[in-house]
Amino acid sequence: MAAPMLRGCCLGRCWALACIDSGSRHGRGAATGFTSSGKRGQSFVAQQPLLTAQKSRKGEHKWAAVVGLEIHAQIASNSKLFSGSQVHFAAPPNSLVSFFDASLPGTLPVLNRRCVEAAVMTGLALNCHINKKSLFDRKHYFYADLPAGYQITQQRLPIAVNGSLAYSVCVGKKWRQVITKTVRIKQIQLEQDSGKSLHDELRSQTLIDLNRAGVGLLEVVLEPDMSCGEEAATAVRELQLILQALGTSQANMAEGQLRVDANISVHHPGEPLGVRTEVKNLNSARFLARAIDYEIQRQINELENGCEILNETRSFDYKLGCTVPMRDKEGKQDYRFMPEPNLPPLLLYDTASLPAGADPQQVINIDRIREQLPELPSETREKLIQQYGILPEHSFALLNEVGLLEFFQNVIKETRAEPKKVTSWVLNIFLGFLKQRNLAVNESPVTPSVLAELLNLLDRKVISSAAAKQVFEELWRSKGKTPSQIVSERKLELMQDEEALERVCHAVMEGHPQVVMDMKRGNPRAINKLIGLVRKVTHNRADPMVIKEILEKQLSS
């Protein structure tokens, strides 16, 4: 059978894909290691899952939780997986729907080349084996927002298999105790997204928006190697950073571009695995962690009270902080999988197997995509630690906020301050201001150049640290002013007249004889109090180190 014709698609500069509402859903892909009876399949016997023992409430037995994930990432592409319809977030309802998306008779799918390349690149970045031959299947289920009555997916032979995802978690309360864990990736498959159901409770009706129907998805199936909500959320966040670095998905969870289904079960260590439940459509890492931890505890409570765990699909109510039943869990037989008759096998090539004289527009070369892989987040973090000498937890923080790493590096280029000082200002002060005002990095009124100028003033000892913070606060209020202008207007320069500073110190010591006496007795808090009093008199314009030297000199004389 001939390879499918590929439809070209150029990647735009900025992407915003369809959002998901709380009532929307799409079909499951391949199972993450459990059968419908709740027992895990034979393929996972060779490696035991990573288990976290949890004591039951009654303290009689320990429980172990097993967590697997199915992650659906919308592919960053101008058009849909099998049609030429455009992809835009928040477009007017049903304005981006082709005849194929609406499943009109006689319409046929045409595979989007960009989506295939994105799947291959993602698989390579996740250490997967890329199948040179993969197949498409029909997965049947009936919902109003799935007009064909089936989804085109890759059940039998997906495009990528047997990968791994490394992620780092903290042990205990301190982020400095970081350990790296690895979760196995069963497969990555291409599939269509469904439409969206809009529920109008006032009129007691449901409206259908098919703008999202047919948008390309990457389903990444993680093996059940995790044991708690924190591990799952951290793994998803790492995958999100990888997808964004690759440019294969914007992976914006708030806009539904990354959704997670969690498969959860509990059992006593050494005993067979328990019956699992699936929590669907989690679109926040925080909600994912909360949902998993709640579901683990719920299952433990149910079993300890003599109840049974049902093999069911549940949803997470973030307002109540609990999972609630949705429906019984479907098995593979319910989906009636069958080969997709309108799509031949997808054939990929490497350099060695590339046919002579092949049309580059109709052939995808795995090795060529491998050469285009960008620097991945783990490599970036290691480079930051080596280049700037920052702590591992700081490298994570710089990457976890969109645009923060670029901001940090631009400040470094324009300042004489040490990287550690720049790191402290960016993560503690700059990021703190952003969080307080709920702003993104690109919305900040303080540019990298402005912060670099402020740090240069601080590095040259023109101003004190306290004055620098005052200037920073003023920069948020007075857009357009430079740090130097603010320092000059508010007279925040450090006192350069040492004789005048000595007179101030002498006056403070005379006015606080008891503190001076405590200082002579060796009380370390006493000198700090005197330094604070001098700084108050000088309106924070005196260098604390210089003040300390003068006080110690006057005390010994």
Image: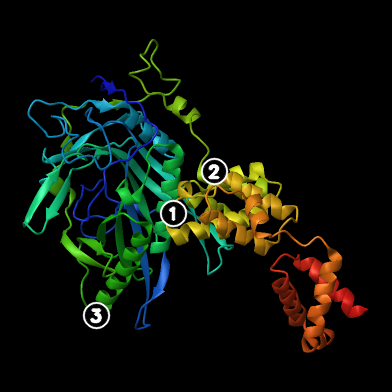
Identify the residue at horizontal 21%, vertical 29% (top origin). Answer: 83
In primary-sequence order, the first of circles 2 and 3 is 3
User: Residue at horizontal 72%, vertical 64%?
Assistant: 541
Image coordinates for residue 206, horizontal then vertical, percent:
9, 51
Q: How is the image coloured?
A: rainbow
State the residue at coordinates (44%, 37%).
246
**Nearer to us in this view, 494 or 217:** 494
Mark 2 element type: helix
Point out which mark residue 215 bears: none
Q: Nearer the viewer, mark 2 or mark 3?
A: 2
Q: Quadrant of residue 508?
A: bottom right
Q: CA distance from mark 3 to mark 1?
A: 47 Å
**Is 144 positioned to the left or the right of 556 in the image?**
left
Q: Is residue 39 above or below residue 554?
A: above
> Quadrant of the image for the C terminus?
bottom right
Disc 1, SS: loop
Q: Reading the chain from its start, which is encountered first: label 1 or label 2?
A: 2
**Residue 318 at what x, y percent from top left?**
28, 65
Which residue is the site of mark 3?
A: 305
Closer-to-camera residue (105/345):
105
Marking on residue 406: 2
Task: Name the amino acid, label 3.
Answer: Asn
SS of the residue under disc 3: loop
Q: Amino acid at mark 1?
A: Leu
Indicate the quadrant where residue 93 lies: top left
Within 10 Å of the Cα at label 3, are there few (<14), some (14-19), or many (20+) other Cα atoms?
A: few
Query: In front: mark 3 or mark 1?
Result: 1
Please give left or right for residue 467 compared with residue 393 in the image.
Answer: right
What residue sits right under mark 1 in the picture?
Answer: 439
Observer able to see residue 477: yes
